Amino acid sequence: MTDVELGEGLDTIAVGAFCYCRSLKRIAIPLKASFLLNDTFDDCDDLVTVTLVGGIHETVSNLPFESWRNEMNEEIDRINHLLPTLTPGLKTIEIQRWIESVLGRINHFKAEHRRLLMEAATQIEMALWSAKLEEEHVSGTDEEQRAERRVNCGSAIIIPNVLAFLVMPS
């Protein structure tokens, strides 16, 4: 057996599942934090390639900035540069660390994306409110009218409906 692809629905690989499978060169696995148990790839001398199955590739392609996409693709590919240099006994540990690193980076970018969306939503709301004030010629001293225009400026309809299309897939 030289090439194995495991489905996204699989939750874990048992301890030593591929132990002593010396001809295994490539394995495709889902990106899950507790997917690998200890010694899964002990003595897999030829294992040099790990690829990810599932929605991670769509998530990466939907990142809003090219630099984020590039960084994620480099992190995803990093394991394939590292594996050929490792002794077989260290491969499981390094793949586990790599999975944690990939998950950490993608969660960081999702959180940053959400922060940027919230910042943009605030700017949209302020622009709508300002336009409503100018449209109705409300002076800066009438706080009650200003507050009413803010509530009725349309942002309560626009922001939730626009932001829903900008949220990253899980």
Image (cartoon, rainbow, N blue to C red):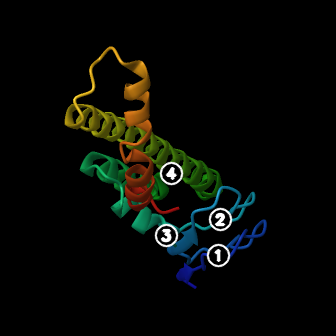
Image quarter hosting the N terminus: bottom right
Q: Residue at x 60, y 80 (%)?
A: 7
37 horizontally vs 4: left or right: right
Front of the two marks 2 and 3 = 3
Q: Name which residue type carries label 4.
A: Val
Residue under pointer 4: 102
Q: Residue at x 50, y 51 (%)?
A: 102
Front of the two marks 4 and 2 = 4
Indicate which disc, 4 or 2, sits on the residue closer to the N terminus: 2
Distance, label 2 to label 3, CA atoms, is 30 Å
Residue under pointer 1: 21
Give the structural element (helix, strand or loop) at label 3. loop
How many neighbours does mark 2 have within 10 angstroms: few (below 14), some (14-19), or many (20 or more)?
many
Give the structural element (helix, strand or loop) at label 4. helix
Distance, label 4 to label 1, CA atoms, is 26 Å
141 versus 61 height, above or below:
above
161 horizontally vs 10: left or right: left
Distance, label 2 to label 1, CA atoms, is 7 Å
Distance, label 4 to label 2, CA atoms, is 24 Å
Q: Name which residue type carries label 2.
A: Asp
Looking at the rendering, which quadrant does residue 124 occupy? top left
Distance, label 4 to label 3, CA atoms, is 13 Å
Query: Residue 54 in the image: x percent, y percent?
Result: 52, 73
Indicate which disc, 4 or 3, sits on the residue closer to the N terminus: 3
Q: Name which residue type carries label 1.
A: Cys
Residue under pointer 3: 55
